[in-house]
Each structure stands twice: as C-alpha cells, then as structure tokens.
Image: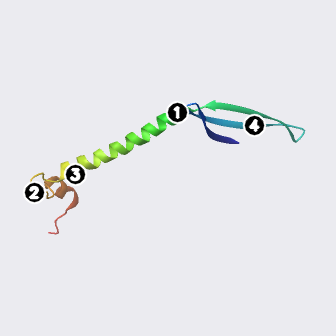
C-alpha cells in the first residue's frame, strides 16, 4: 500500500510517501515493513510546473490571436484565412 501525507512542522509542510510492505511467512503476514520518503521537493516542483504550463497556455493563446488578427481592424488576417478557409470554386 502506498499513501501520501502532508504534515505541518512549524511553518513548513512536509509531504511524504509511505509504503507498507507485508512480510509473509507460512502464508501469513508476520510483519510489515514501512518505508517513508520525503517527496516535498518533487511535489513543490510539480505544482510550479503546472502553474508555468498554465501561464504558457495563456500566452500561447494571446500569441495566436496576435498572429491571426489585424491589430488595426480587429479582423482575421490572411494567415488565419489561409488556415481556416477554403474556397468553394
């Protein structure tokens, strides 16, 4: 069994992953080995990456709009029309 826990120590949150591994002898669980690993840094990094990805998505949407819309008229430009419009001749 694997679990994650957040524990507050003073002003810090510590995130740990706990693994509980049964020791089986004669078809019976005789002991349980518990291993605890501090994953605070990887969880913090994961949250930062998620935040950065959202920021990049936002800027990519803005960049796409800037690339496809004329800044003076607000109308789609030739780049957008070339991608999204096909003549019916």
Residue underneath mark 3: 65
Q: CA distance from mark 2 to mark 4?
A: 66 Å
Instruction: Work out whether mark 1 precedes mark 2 in sequence or the reverse, and give the earlier one.
Output: 1
Q: Which of the 4 quarters of the picture holds residue 25?
A: top right
Q: CA distance from mark 4 to mark 3?
A: 53 Å
Badges 4 and 3: C-beta atoms under 8 Å apart? no
Q: CA distance from mark 1 to mark 2?
A: 47 Å
Percent of width and height locating residue 16: 62, 35
Nearer-the-camera pick, 39 or 7: 7
Instruction: Work out whether mark 2 precedes mark 3 in sequence or the reverse, and give the earlier one.
Output: 3
Q: Residues within 10 Å of mark 2 (few under 14, many from 20)?
A: few
Residue underneath mark 1: 42
Give left or right: position of 52 versus 82. Answer: right
Residue located 13% across and 53% down the image? 70
Q: Secondary structure at mark 2?
A: loop
Q: Residues within 10 Å of mark 1 (few under 14, many from 20)?
A: few
Instruction: Work out whether mark 2 precedes mark 4 in sequence or the reverse, and give the earlier one.
Output: 4
Percent of width and height locating residue 5: 62, 39
Q: CA distance from mark 2 to mark 3?
A: 13 Å
Q: Residues within 10 Å of mark 3 (few under 14, many from 20)?
A: some
Work out which quarter of the rendered image holds the N terminus and state it: top right
Residue underneath mark 4: 21
Percent of width and height locating residue 30: 86, 36
Q: Which one is in front in this view, the residue at disc 1 or the one at disc 4?
A: 1
Q: CA distance from mark 1 to mark 3?
A: 35 Å
Give left or right: position of 87 versus 32. Answer: left
Instruction: Work out whether mark 1 precedes mark 3 in sequence or the reverse, and give the earlier one.
Output: 1
Identity of the residue furthest to the front in this view: 10
């Amino acid at each position: 069994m694997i679990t994650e826990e957040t524990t507050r120590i003073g002003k810090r949150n510590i995130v740990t992953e706990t693994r509980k591994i049964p020791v089986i002898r004669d078809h019976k669980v005789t002991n349980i080995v518990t291993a605890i690993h501090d994953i605070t840094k990887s969880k913090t990094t994961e949250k930062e990456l998620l935040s950065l990805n959202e920021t990049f998505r936002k800027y990519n949407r803005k960049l796409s709009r800037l690339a496809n819309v004329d800044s003076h008229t607000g109308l789609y430009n030739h780049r957008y029309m070339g991608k999204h419009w096909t003549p019916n001749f």
